[in-house]
Image (cartoon, coloured by chain):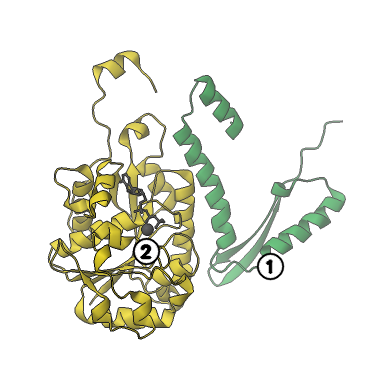
Chain colours: A yellow, B green
Amino acid sequence: MAKVIVVTSGKGGVGKTTTSASFSSGLALRGNRTVVIDFDVGLRNLDLIMGCERRVVFDIVNVIHGEAALSRALIKDKHCDNLFVLPASQTRDKEALTLDGVQRIIDELKESFDYIVCDSPAGIEHGAYSAMYFADEALVVTNPEVSSVRDSDRILGILAAKSRRAVEGREPVKEHLLVTRYNPTRVAAGEMLSVDDIQEILRIPLLGVIPESEAVLQASNAGTPAIHLEKSDVAEAYKDVVARFMGEDVPMRFVTAEKVGLFKRLFGGR
Amino acid sequence: MSLIDSLLAYLRGDEKKTAAVAKERLQIILAHERAGRGADAPDYLPALQEELLQVIAKYIHIDRDMIKVQLEKHGDYEVLELNVTLPERPRA
Ligand SMILES: Nc1ncnc2c1ncn2[C@@H]1O[C@H](COP(=O)(O)OP(=O)(O)OP(=O)(O)O)[C@@H](O)[C@H]1O
Ligand SMILES: [Mg+2]
């Protein structure tokens, strides 16, 4: 049975699109037939992060309006065989995503894919709502920062009350905490909320921790999802996340600071 | 220790790291927001809270944050909980 996974956060700019790109690529690399949908209508970006922006012809709104067949709007990813991208419209506004239309698309995708990953826009308005409504599972992307944690809590409340699973009284959406842009050195210095703090506050199972890394910018510059970068922490961290999602027991990495050098130990500095 | 105190303490250097301050603040605000959200927090709660505040203020001088109205679910029935913290009585 195909699974629908929403990548959501409430707060903007925390790493949803970066995560959607790497997570869907990771699922596909493991042989799963995967499609990733950009729900950020009006501010499409997933195409750029996946490096397929010049191949966009039709988008999700065209499909909803019956102007293009779903199969014609799907773009095959250039890095992975089993991955397809359904881009958002750049010119319409988010109201164009009717629940009815989205449902038809998801139902059709369920026939040929194992995983349907939905990259949510920021906020708690219509766009975010239509991205999470059909979800079976949710990756709640959270930065170690007060406003991000608060917004994640808000989104968790919405998932629990307004998703289709909640409305129909079915088993609730399975929630996963994904802490991104984590800086273990600052955590050790007491300057940043720790993963444990965040988990204690949000009270949902931790799927993984993605370190803050300069490699992410390089990946987006090149239009290559970060998971493909050689020898980078972020790529390793995203691979771990996918492995855990698939049920493997992988220990957490990148949560503790590297050894502090002699200079720092001598001269302190908090 | 109040938040301002802890922030001052931090700036003075006698600790309480900002991450700890952040955690404490989040725990307080989220406890509050979750209570308001409840299972299906009815939307009259804020108005009810406001009117109760006005009535109580006729008799006792209290601050806005000294009164809290929330709906709690206990099994099959719901309890409307009204919490008023009275100011300390000045000693005669
Ligand atoms: N682990 C990371 N390390 C460093 N930078 C990161 C990391 N993850 C994301 N970023 C950067 O943060 C910015 C926002 O990322 P991204 O676009 O994925 O967020 P978003 O949640 O999708 O934003 P929006 O809410 O606008 O859709 C980008 O510049 C991205 O390169
Ligand atoms: Mg995005």
The residue positioned farthest toward the bottom in the image shown: A66
- Residue drawn at x 29%, y 56% is A19
Q: Is residue A270 above or below residue A180?
A: above
- Residue drawn at x 45%, y 35% is B19
- Read off the residue under disc 2: A44
Residue A60, x across and y down, in percent: 34, 75
Amino acid residing under circle 1? Tyr
Counting other residues with Cα less than 10 Å from the Cα at mark 2, is it few (<14), some (14-19), or many (20 or more)? some
Amino acid residing under circle 2? Arg
Q: Nearer the viewer, mark 1 or mark 2?
A: 2
The residue positioned farthest toward the top in the image shown: A266
A79 and B59: which one is in front? A79
Q: Is residue A246 visible?
A: no
Counting other residues with Cα less than 10 Å from the Cα at mark 1, is it few (<14), some (14-19), or many (20 or more)? few
Examine the image and state in which quarter residue A91 appears: bottom left
Q: Within 8 Å of ligand 2, the CB of disc 2?
A: no
Host chain of mark 1: B
- Read off the residue under disc 1: B44
Examine the image and state in which quarter residue A121 appears: bottom left
Q: Is residue A61 above or below residue A81?
A: below
| Distance from the alpha carbon under mark 1 to that under mark 2 | 38 Å
Q: Report whether A224 appears left or right of A142.
A: left
Q: Report whether B27 appears left or right of A29.
A: right
A108 and A251: which one is in front? A108
Tag 2's secondary structure? loop
Residue B18, x across and y down, in percent: 47, 32
Q: Report whether A247 appears left or right of B76.
A: left
Residue A57, x across and y down, in percent: 28, 73
Quarter of the image for the N terminus of chain A: give it.
bottom left
Q: Are marks 1 and 2 on the same chain?
A: no
Asked if the residue at tag 2 contacts the one at tag 1, i.e. Cβ–Cβ closer than 8 Å, the answer is no
